[in-house]
Amino acid sequence: MPQPPPPSRRRLANPQSAHATPAQSGHGDTDQPCLLERAQLHAVPSTLLIPLAARAHGGRYFAWLACQDAVATQLLDELGADVNAYLDDLPTVLNVLWRTRAIKQVGQAFFAEHPQALGVNLGCGLTHHFQWLDTGANQWLDADLPEVMALREQLLPLRCPRARHVQVDLTQTGWWKRLALPRKGPDAQPVLLICEGVLMYLQPEQVHAVLAEFAQNATPGSRMVLDVLTRQAVGRAAIHASVGPTGAEFCWGVGRMAELEQMHPRLKLLREQSVSECYGWTGIALDILWRPWLGAPLYGMATLGVEAASP
C-alpha cells in the first residue's frame, strides 16, 4: 500500500476566530455574539468542529481521500470558526477522511440492497451524510443532543420530505422507541445506523446499553458502523491535539474488536478496519507490532450486523 504523500501545512486565508465578534466573522453587528458562541456547546458536543474542518479542507492535504463535502465549508463560514488548529493536526484530519470513506462504503452497499430503508446518524453533529447516501427513495434521520440539533436546524434546515431531525440522548435507554425507529418484525425493513465520534465519550456500561438496544430492536440485516479506540487510549484525551483543548475525555475503548459482538447474542462483527491502512506498509507493520499490547487498532472502524434470533 503506498504511503500518503507528504502534505502541505498551508493555513487558511483570512481565518475567523471561534470566539470572534460578528463583525470579525461577517455575521451582523458587533453587539451580538457569533453563532458558535450563541450555541454554547459543552465539551463533547464542541468536538463536532473537528470532523467538519477535516471534511471541508482536508482534501488539500490528502487529495486521495477528499470526500467532496458540499456543505462543510459553508457551515464553517456560518459558524465563524477558526479551524486552523484542527488542520494542523494532520493525523486526525487523515483519520476523519478515512472514516468518512469507510462510512460511505458501508452506506452505499447497504442502500444498494435496501434502497427504501432508513438511515440514522446517531450523534450527527453537523455531518451531512445524506448528501452521499440519498437514493431518491430512502429515509434519513439525524439525531443529537438538543443544543446540537438547535444549531443544526439553523444551519441545515430540512429540505427533503424523506429526512427528519430528532433530539436524542444516547445515555438514556429507550432511545430506539423515542426515535420511532422500526422494530423487528415480519414487515420491518433493516436500518443503517452511523455512530461516529460518539461512543468513545460514553461510559462502558452506556456503550453496552446502546449496542444492546440496537441488537434487541433492529430487523435482521440491519447494520451499525462505528469508530473505536483501543482501551489504552481511555483517560488520555488531554494529549490528543484536537480533542484535548475541548475538555472532552475518552471513556470507552476496546481490548479486542471481538468484544463488540459479545455484547449481545444477535450482534455479529462483519468487518473491522484499522486506520493503519492509511499509512502504508509502515503503518501496517506498526499495527502488527503494537497489537499484542493494544489488543485492538489504535483507531479503527467496525461494522456490526444483527442476526436473526436463535430458535
Image: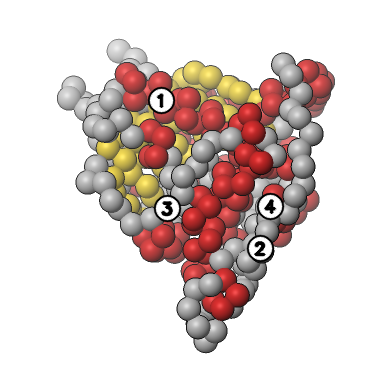
- Residue at numbered disc 3: 144
- Say few, some or many: other residues with alpha carbon within 10 Å of mark 3 (under 14 / 14 to 19 / 20 or more): many
Q: Is residue 272 visible?
A: yes
- SS class of the residue under badge 3? strand
Amino acid type of disc 1? Gln
Sequence-wise, which precedes: disc 2 or disc 4?
Answer: 2
Horizontal placement of 216 versus 87: left or right?
left
Give the CA separation, mark 2 to mark 4. Answer: 12 Å
Q: Classify mark 4: residues with Cα within 10 Å, few (<14), some (14-19) or many (20+).
A: many
Say what secondary structure mark 4 lies in. helix
* Amino acid under disc 2: Pro
In-front residue for pair 250/227: 227
Q: Which residue is mark 4?
A: 86
Location of mark 2 (residue) = 15
Q: Position of residue 102 (x, y in %)?
A: 53, 28
Q: Amino acid at mark 4?
A: Tyr
Q: What residue sits 66% from the left and 63% below the top?
A: 15
Residue 108, which numbered label?
Answer: 1
* SS for callout 1: helix
Q: Amino acid at mark 3?
A: Asp
Marks 3, 2: nearer the viewer:
2
Q: Is residue 15 above or below residue 295?
A: below
Q: Do the CB atoms of the residues marked 3 and 2 lie less than 8 Å apart?
A: no
Q: Quadrant of residue 232?
A: top right
Q: Residue furthest bottom?
A: 31
Identity of the residue furthest to the top in this view: 311
Nearer to us: label 2 or label 4:
2
What label does residue 295 carry, if any?
none
Q: Is residue 233 something one can see in this rendering? A: no
Name the residue nearer the viewer: 98 or 175.
Answer: 98
Among numbered discs 1 and 2, the one appearing first in the sequence: 2
Return the x and y of residue 46 as percentages of the image width and height.
57, 59
